[in-house]
Structures are given as C-alpha cells and as structure tokens.
Image (cartoon, rainbow, N blue to C red):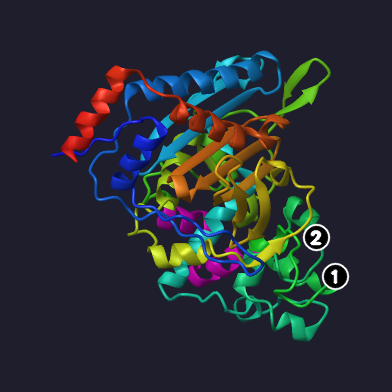
Amino acid sequence: MKKLIAIATPTLLLVVLFLICISAKQPELPEQPQAVLLPQPSPIEDFYVPDSFKERLMDSIQAYFNNAVRKNQIVGASVAIVKCDSIIYADGFGSKNSRLKNKVDKETVFRIGSVSKGFAGILAGIHVQQGLISWKDRVIDHIPNFRLASKKQTNEVTLSHILSHTSGLPYHSFTNLVESGMPLETIAGRFNQVLPLQKPGSIYNYQNAVFALSGEIMERIHGKPLKDIIQDKIFDPLNMETASASYEELEKSGNVAQPHRPIRRGWRPVKYNKKYYSAVAAGGINASVVDMGKWMKFLLGNNPEVLMPKFMQEVFSPKIQVGGRRNYYQRWKGYESSHYALGWRVHNFVDNKTQVPYKVIHHGGTVNNFRSEIALFPHDDLGICVLFNSPNKMARNCIPEIYKMIQDILENPLPEKENSFIQESLVML
C-alpha cells in the first residue's frame, strides 16, 4: 500500500517527514570544511503532497513572478521546486520574446551559464567512479601542453584544483579568450604568461578558462566532444529531454527563450551568441526547468545508478573557503560562511528563529543575457531552480524568497478538516 505524506502544522510535519524522507541534520561547517550529508533515496513509491499545499504554493509563486513581469523587472522566468523524489512545482512566467509576447512554459529552454559548472563536477565524479580519472590526477598528464609560469606549480595542479578554482592563478585568468571562442588546447598553453598568486590549493580565485580544462580532460579520455559525453552520462540516463550542450542544439529547439538586454523603457531581444560552447564545462549547457527539476531530484540522492552517494558526497565536499562579504548570496538572511566544492558553492546558514545551522548547495550563472540560480537544501530534501532570459536584480534574492514562501506555507496551520486527513494518513504508515 502506498504511503501518504501531507503538509501539516510544523510539529506534525516534522513527524511525517521523518518517516517519509531519510535526511540527516547537518553540523555547522567550521574553519576546516566538512562534507555535506545528502538525503538517502526513499523506498516509497509515491511522494504525495495535498492539493491545498500545491495551490497555496502556486498562488504565492505566481504572484511573485507576475508582479515582476508587470513591473518590467524581468521579461520571462521559469521555476522548478523539488521535494524528496518529486517535482512539486514547475511553470513559466512572462515572455520568451518581449515583442512576440509568446509565453514561457515549463519546457522552454534557457541557457544556464555557470550553473553548468555543477554538471562538470558531477560528470567528473562519474569518471572517478568508473576509474577513468582521479581527483588527484595532474592536469599536465592529460593535457601535455598545459603550462604555468612556474614549472613546479604546473606539475602540482590537479583535477580537484581546477574544479574548485584553487589552481593559484589570478581571478578570471583568460576568461576573455574563452569568450572569444579560442580552443581550450590553445589557451592551456598560454597560462605561462600569467604569474600565479599562490601555490595550488591554497587560494580561491574564480575561473572559467582553467575550470573548462576539466572538460578537455574528459574529451581526451573518450575521444569525443564533451556535449556528447554529457548526453551519454547525464542527460539520457536522467531523461533530460530538452537539455543540450551546443549552440546548434539551442538553435534547433522549438521552444526556447530569447535573451534580452535592458533599454530605457523596457527590454530589447538580442541574438544568441556562441560564448562558452567551446568551454561547455564552464557555461555551455541549455535546459528547460522541467529538466532542471530532474537534475535536482538526482542531486538530492535519487538515481544512484548514475552516481553512487559516496562519489556524490565527494563532489559536494568543500575544498576552499570563499572570503569577503560582497557576493549577493553573502547577504542572504542567516548567512554565515561559504566554501567552494567541485563545481558547487556550499553555504552555511543559521536559522534566525531556531538558531539551528544548515547548509545550502548553490550556484548562479550568467551568459548571453540569461541568468540562472539553483540551490539544494539537503536538511529539507528540497531543491529550487529559477531561469531568466534577462539580466535582473530579482535573481540575487529569488532563492531565499521562494524558500521563505515554502516555509511560511508549512508554518501556517491548516484547517481542522485537513488535520484530520493527516491523522488518518499517519495511521496508515
């Protein structure tokens, strides 16, 4: 008999979720980073959420995004929310093209920019699981023409370093060459023109060119383009039907959002460009929010046949602390600190009400006037992804604001009739 779970008052909800979703409380990340514990796959056939919760969630999100469209803050957006093993919400708002007024829906394809880095980290984890590479593999052993100014440091840079932005090179080294479309093999031989700041593994400096070499390594292992490797090892196994990693596939998409740039009285559609399709690992993936929902289900511990939990934990294991307080996510309520893992940021928060620490696995992306955000809340077995086809300020806070909507609905007591339904559901467990 299928087990049921209902959205209830806070105390009752905790009881139900404990029985339905196996998830561990997370310790606060100290100066020495600790691994993120992910929820384990649930043996339950169906995850059921009452219509009343879905309706209230839908109303809140629709009001939030429709208001932004009405005020011309955004052109279009698409949203997916995942709980346990289910996509509990997926929809689109606004227009794919501001001139045509054609509506965004849940299958509309967007470019996701640096959210692609999370795919690169997981893809590398799949290769480690298969014994094809190691996190400690030296870059020069796979790309012989890779050169830094120091021979010693050239020999020390590993796959883990480039996926965690700890190669020791200055911030955004040669991103301009990536955006110009220069082949990664050529760029790899030019890093000797840049003086490293620190030894590999000792300092965090965000990269695109060096990070993208992770994809070059996997291409050399298989002898085929990274777009095909991702298709074979991630998109196809997860049934991500609209996802792709090339400019040609984006052009062929029948349902695709047009990028926009702001003008004095609104927005102007702009052309698609080919930036980062020569460096897919750093920012070259296209996807709809439905497919991003499938991606988040996988990241929350489902589909272990694609990547086993042990290796997923390695991808999410923090490698280096991210300093400062200027990044937008560092201004989210309850924020404490951040580390970078392998293609992912791991943030530490403290709940303002309960003072309980928790973690958020997160990344944002910007490319070709598209903007994207993805976040996983392992302690809640929850994932949120938002895709935009215009640059905007809303993207900076959409994740915590949507998370708060969900929490507010959960904390709002339900009518007596629905509480009775929950009691009956608990008896069936």
Horizontally, residue 383 falls left or right of residue 179, namely left
Disc 2 marks which residue? 171
**Residue 164 on image: x %, y %:** 64, 65
Q: How many marks?
A: 2
Nearer to the camera, 189 or 414: 414
Viewer can see residue 277? no
Local secondary structure at mark 1: loop
Disc 1 marks which residue? 194
Nearer to the camera, 122 or 141: 122
Q: Which residues are magenta?
A: 213-234
Horizontally, residue 389 falls left or right of residue 305, namely right
Viewer can see residue 59? yes
Residue count near mark 2 (Cα–Cα under 10 Å), binned few <14, some 14–19, many ≥20: some
Quadrant the C terminus occupies: top left
**Residue 180 on image: x %, y %:** 77, 51
Horizontally, residue 88 falls left or right of residue 227, namely left
Q: Which mark is residue 268?
A: none
Nearer to the camera, 172 or 316: 316
- Toward the left, the furthest residue is 1
* Residue 233 among magenta residues: yes
> What residue sits 36% from the left and 30% below the top?
8
Amino acid type, callout 1: Val
Location of residue 132 with respect to 90 vertically, above or below: below
Quarter of the rendering containing residue 198: bottom right
> What residue sits 40% from the left and 72% below the top?
130
- Identify the main secondary structure in magenta: helix
Going from N to C along the chain, the mark reached first, 1 or 2, is: 2
**Residue 27 on image: x %, y %:** 52, 60
